[in-house]
Image (cartoon, rainbow, N blue to C red):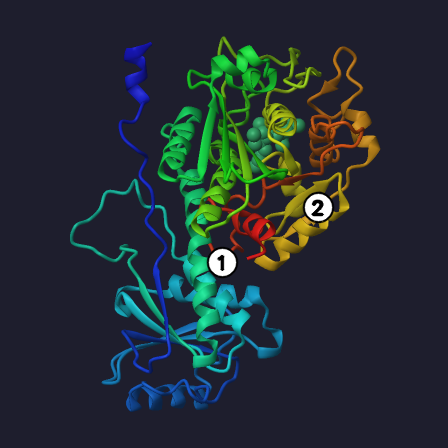
Amino acid sequence: MRRFGRIFKRHGPLPQSGEPMQVIVNTNENTNGTLVLPLWQDSKNMAPGSESGVHRSLKNQIENILVEGDFKAKAGTAMTLAGTEGGKALLIGLGKEEDATPQVMRESGAKVTASCKKIHGKTLTVKFHGMEDAYMAAFVEGMILRDYSYDNYKTKDEDDDSDDRELKIHVTCEEEKHAALETSAETSSAVATGVYLARDLGNAPPNDLYPMEFARQAIEFGSAHDNVDVKVINYDEARTMGMGGLVGVGMGSYRKPCMVIFEINGDKPGPSPCIVGKGITFDTGGISIKPSPSMDEMKYDMHGSATTFGVMQALVASGHKDRVIGLTCMAENMPSSNAQRPGDVITTYSGKTVEVLNTDAEGRLVLSDGLWYAGTHLNPSYMIDLATLTGACVVALGHEASGLWSNNDELLNNIKEAGEHCGEIAWPMPLFKAFEKEMTDSKIADVRNLGAGRWGGSNTAAAFLKQFVPNMEGTDEQIPWAHLDIAGTAWGAKTNKLVKNGATGIHVRTLHHLITGQ
Ligand code: BES
Ligand code: ZN
Ligand code: ZN
């Protein structure tokens, strides 16, 4: 066993991407490095006030271009100017002023970092003028979020520094808006550390990121912060405790399953928000094996756990003072002689039995133990689970929104609003009684892990999870709970302009905003 272990175990930590770029907010009129000019559509001149500190020849060149209509500043467009004695500039189109939204501004900010090439250098100055606080904040947030790429596994060409992400961005605005912009930029940077971490975990190859490696990173995170406690329930403990869902899914893999519990500010009184993540570090489908095409994408099947960890990081970085809980259910779903079979009946941590009709519907099994443990041991005010749970959710909503189910209208609305605020849409989906009935009519167990037919697959999955939400102590009412199916939003959304490729870090910002109001 030991010798075999050496074949795949990494020695030392997984490579991680760096810190978010430096953003310096100032009112000084100098232009450091390349000038970045956000422009409303069809502007004929630079916004009054933004010309200060810009060399006359560059200003003339910009105004000529605008007067001639050579750059119309439509949303999503950019133009680079170089070769004048007045320095370089990057013009960014914001679209029509009347169509502006925070999301348009985020995407415009993202266009800056996406457009940055060697020619622009490492230092830029964005000049805002006459722009409202929320729009400037969103633009800066977009620049930071798009400035991420996962190239940890690429061998570096020592002669080429084009992929070095060490941008330093100065941002200038009117003096009276300075303080607010500085605060929002600081928050964006703090939250971005959580988004980056979630993306790093999501992008990590599954041979390196397996359940106990995730746990190791979580423990390391706990050791690095006085206000964070991390507890790991390992495979043997999960078996002893009767976590049949987690054990059933994970036992077919040499890399054994575990549950990771994060507690931030545990000395503060509960009840507290609790985030629960599906963490399947690779989903082959198990004995109900998946087809080969795109199976590699199932490394992202742990993005619920990546987001959970990312939210913890974001809360710590932004200095959150209240208690928050995170719980991740980690397993690798593999076919093997020790894997569970279609037809097996398992007993979950709740005591309820489940007929496993398809081993590829494994996310709900690990979450059944996670939700029950969180609800009965961790004193949650509410629980929100995140899971790349069903292909059916991608059929329903594409890559534009996560599915959102809840047993509590207030919680559902709060999550929906937080998602809208952050440009991470969570779309309400139904928890009809008929779906619950469908999932609880197994002939031989309490619950079945597969719907009776193929229709409404994301709804029946949510109805399954609802069976494992405990009641509030001393009542016959369930703990407020919501489920986010992030199968379509966790990676690969071509329309997500805040991500170059790969894992998105979806809902780290939504949940940070929901919990902190920031
Ligand atoms: N991880 C998958 C869901 C998934 C599929 C996410 C494609 C993103 C893209 C999940 O474990 C799964 O395989 N679900 C099955 C459920 C079915 C067997 C009831 C599915 O969606 O096909
Ligand atoms: Zn599966
Ligand atoms: Zn899965």
- The answer for how far apart the CA atoms under marks 1 and 2 are is 28 Å
Labelled disc at residue 411: 2
Identified by mark 2, the residue type is Leu
Front residue of this view, candidates 475 and 36:
475
Q: Residue at x 40, y 86 (%)?
A: 65
Expressed as whole percent of the image width and height from the top left, the position of residue 236 reads: 48, 12
- Can residue 384 be seen here? The reply is no
344 with respect to 190 (left or right): right
Residue at image x 29%, y 77%? 88
Query: Which mark is on residue 47?
Result: none
Q: Residue furthest left?
A: 159
| Residue at image mark 1 | 497
- Label 2: few (<14), some or many (≥20) within 10 Å? some
Quadrant where ligand 3 appears? top right
Q: Nearer the viewer, residue 50 or 313?
A: 313
Image position, residue 243 (x, y; %): 59, 17
Q: Report whether 403 appears left or right of 197.
A: right
Task: Judge left or right: residue 99 versus residue 50.
Answer: right
**Eyeballing the image, is 93 above or below 467?**
below
